Image: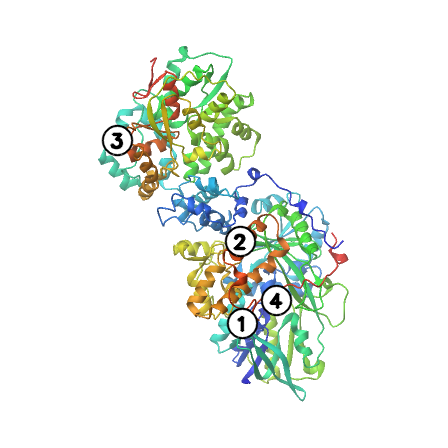
Amino acid sequence: MQSIQTEVLVIGGGATGTGVMRDLAMRGFKTILVEKRDLSHGTTGRYHGLLHSGGRYAVKDPDAARECIEENLILRRIAPHCIEDTGGFFVVTPWDDPAFGDTFMKGCQETGIPCEEISIAQMLKEEPLLNKEMARCFRVPDGSADSFLTSECNVASAKAYGGQMLNYHEVKRLIKEGDKVVGAVCYDLVNDRDVTIHADLVVNASGAWAGKIAGSIGIDVHIIPGKGTMVAIAHRVLNTVVNRCKMPSDGDIIVPVHTVAIIGTTDVKVEDPDQFAIQPWEVQLMLDEGEKLVPGTKQMRMLRAWAGVRPLYQETSVADTRDVTRAYTLLDHSARDGVDNFITITGGKWTTFRQMAEVVVDRVCEKLNTKRECRTHLEAIPDIQHEPRTAEGYYWLGSRLARTEKNKAYGELACECELVTRAEVEEAITKHEAKTFDDIRRDTRLGMGPCQGGFCSYRATGILHTVRQPSIEETNVALRDFLQERWKGLLPILWGPQLKQERLDELMYLHVMNVDHMPGETASRLGPQMYDKGTVETRPQSAKT
Amino acid sequence: MQDEFNLLDMAEVPLHEWPVEQTLDNCIKCNICVTACPVAAVTDKFPGPKYEAPQAGRFRHDMQPTPDASVDYCSGCRVCNEVCPTGVRIAEINARARRQITKDSGIPLRNRLLGRNELLGKIGSYVPRLANFGLQNPLSRSMADMMFGIAKEAPLPTWSTKGTFWDWFKRTRAQRLKSEKKVVYFNGCATMYYEPFIGQAAVAVFEHNGYEVIVPPQKCCGLPMLSNGEFDAASEYHQYNVDHLHDYAAKGYDIIGTSTSCTLTLKEEAPELLHLTDERSHKLSYATWDIFEWLRERHEAGELKTDFRPLNMVLPYHAPCQYRAHRVGKPALDLLELIPGLDVRESTARCCGIAGTYGYKSEKYQIAMDVGAELFDFVKTQGSQVEMTACDSETCRWQLEHGTDLPSRHPIEYLAAAYGLYDLERRALLNE
């Protein structure tokens, strides 16, 4: 068995884990991060992409709101290239209590969130498709974020400081010696072998999976996996994040991120973060609620549905996951469970990942008896992309079109929907060591547009085969894995234009290419975990509208 | 109940009522538009309709700067719309994108000039011979090419030296037919200043069939401005036309034009591109007809005179892109085929290339000629007995003449000739 020695082992390649990795590396710790799949494969890559102003929690969860606005301002400074400065509205619809607007305003003032009420005329001028019957509208500094890119950039920054990242390394169990955690045994999915990593200290940043990791040495961390289902509208119907001005509930937000607008979300307690299904009522609810914000939503083309699991943490159990705090929690298991050199960080929001990392690494310093100052809020996270940015350094919707037009790269597009060039796919394979097409997707957005891989999957297959020259069977299974991965998000929304699209894609792959019967395995172990068809959750009372 | 999903909620909204940009979601990437696009077929500067509208369209937003450059190479011919199996309004999305570019970076003087064909027509018509000399001599054309970017070889029209269409209409007022049956004629700028004989032929055909012709005050339909991204100015022109034509439409009069692109603009281009959903624009839109579309209706109702005398000739006919965009079939072809002796040969070429003002621009002249090659070759293969061609749209006719060295006529001229009212050679009414 291969064995590696490091100072700190970080488990989880999501926003929190990569944030912790960067902070550790910047403070000079020898760091290894392990992720069971690809970076952002879990919850980080499956959220709606909101950069919180904190407005959503201003009334219900002031602690979480304060954390959000602090970090919002920091992230705008250190990682503008991962952010689109959309701004956000909180709107009082005819279905909401207009008086809540005052409560909301007061909440924002108390938590330090800049908030101004604007006229409905102004709101419609900026977002003409919004419901004209809105009663009030408040503007807050929400934004949208590219969570894939942020993780990538965090890791790139950490690597520059000497950090090491091992993806497709799944932690099988922690190693405990006496009352100390001294490392973990990981399974290397790519090479099909176990790897032992010894560390002075282990940080469990595995989010919704934190309970599973801690459970491997008998520590009980009660994570409530809160499933959130989202539906993406095929193009940007809105340019501003729009929230319902009421207590947070299902389907009350639309986030414009990259080329789509995402309606989110549901919040359903599930038993297992790896086993859950997207239920038809969830999709219906997103459409019904989306319709209230943008009339006509139901007639629009839906691109895809997906679900992520929030890592909600509560020491005591609660009935409704909406009531669990969105603030983060750090568990030092020496005090809590008598097991030393082991820290779990969980809860929180994508927006607060940096602060969570800072708190964790402060504790790491304490435990390793050293004093090193955090600098992650001071030093910008390097931009690994080559896209034009706004004057302030933000991403903007036209970024990729600008780049394509400038380079006259329209003849070089592998993914036409998301304007991904052949060179970028090659770079994802060679420089970023993509193992699967899904990794290329997270790197480049390949296959994330309306045709959902219809016209790019076969091109990417050709590029992968040319660049890496694997066996034909390996190439075939990689293609099949990706088609399966795209399919699982299409199933819940197959009607209208997307059904037409999928029918065309089906004809191309199953009929023309006969992809089901090409040589090779049906699926690989690196392939997608499908949403579970077996589980049936009933619609919770709180989801009724 | 576990499954509450209701497909009936996805109520079908008729496609023609969808906002233009919304239709980009209908694209299934099938590439049919790319294979049909006449411009993408001849130049790499234009990535093709699929890239420009449904793809680039997802990266554009009214409130943000547009980084577009290549969409300027869309000629606006609308072949893509014609072939799209899912109803994406590609040409309109592209026109809007070009408008966005002009909002960001201004409109070049050349495009302002080309957009103002009415103004140019008016100025030239005061001194037509001088203007013609200015526009047709190599020295001034070379200067215009260098200074403004108007291609020196491009087929610019010549001003009428016998006065404008309105001059003629006023002059012959006493001879005009009075009748209970009335139509409103939209002459368009080309008939007004360059080719008044087309309006004369149209009036003769209307009167021959017993219709009194009304020519109300009117302005340019605005299409050249819409094509060049000048939406505000186009909007003023369109509003003028709505103001002056709406009452006739409300009274139930048909408003009929001989320029296919003008009628298309009144019908749908202007209301769609300018987002005009008011009742008056809508009424005008529904009252507007292309002349052959209207004549075919009369024929199908048994109301059209068919006392045609033979026209013994082989006639290559090209239905312009803008005509096909009316989605009414090829009514001119249907009627020309009624004329005894006339051997009409239908072109299947995609486009003549000129696309309004596109082929006049220096950087696009060669593209336009390459696009038109398909049509020019078609005409050549019809044999040496061909003496002239037919096409409904003025700029297309000029391009066709430029590319084939054969005279081209509007189908209404042939119809008027077949009625014995018009001289095809002289391009004049026989009784004048």
- Circle 3/circle 4 CB separation < 8 Å: no
Q: CA distance from mark 4 to mark 1?
A: 34 Å
The amino acid beneath tag 1 is Thr
**Residue A79 visible from this viewpoint:** no
Q: Nearer the viewer, residue A281 or B272?
A: A281
| Separation (CA) of disc 3 from disc 2 | 59 Å
What mark, if any, has residue A529 been given in the picture?
4
> In which quarter of the view is residue B222 placed?
top left
Give coordinates of residue B93: x percent, y percent: 48, 43
Which numbered disc, 4 or 1, marks the residue that appears first in the sequence? Answer: 1
Note whether residue A273 is visible.
Answer: yes
Residue A507 numbered tag: 2
User: Label 1: few (<14), some or many (≥20) within 10 Å?
Assistant: many
**Which label is found at residue B134?**
3
Residue type of the residue flagged with mark 4: Gln
Query: Is disc 1 placed on a helix, strand or loop?
Result: loop
Disc nearest the viewer among 2 and 1: 2
Q: In the rendered structure, which disc, 2 or 1, sits on the residue that comes first in sequence?
A: 1
Number of disc labels = 4
Q: Nearer the viewer, residue A421 or A342?
A: A421
Q: Are marks 2 and 1 in contact (CB under 8 Å)?
A: no
Q: Secondary structure at mark 3?
A: helix
Q: Disc 1 marks which residue?
A: A376
Q: Nearer the viewer, residue B386 or A484?
A: B386
* Separation of residues labelled 1 and 3 (CA atoms): 69 Å
From what the image shows, is residue A25 above or below residue B128?
Answer: below
Q: Residues within 10 Å of mark 4 (few under 14, many from 20)?
A: few
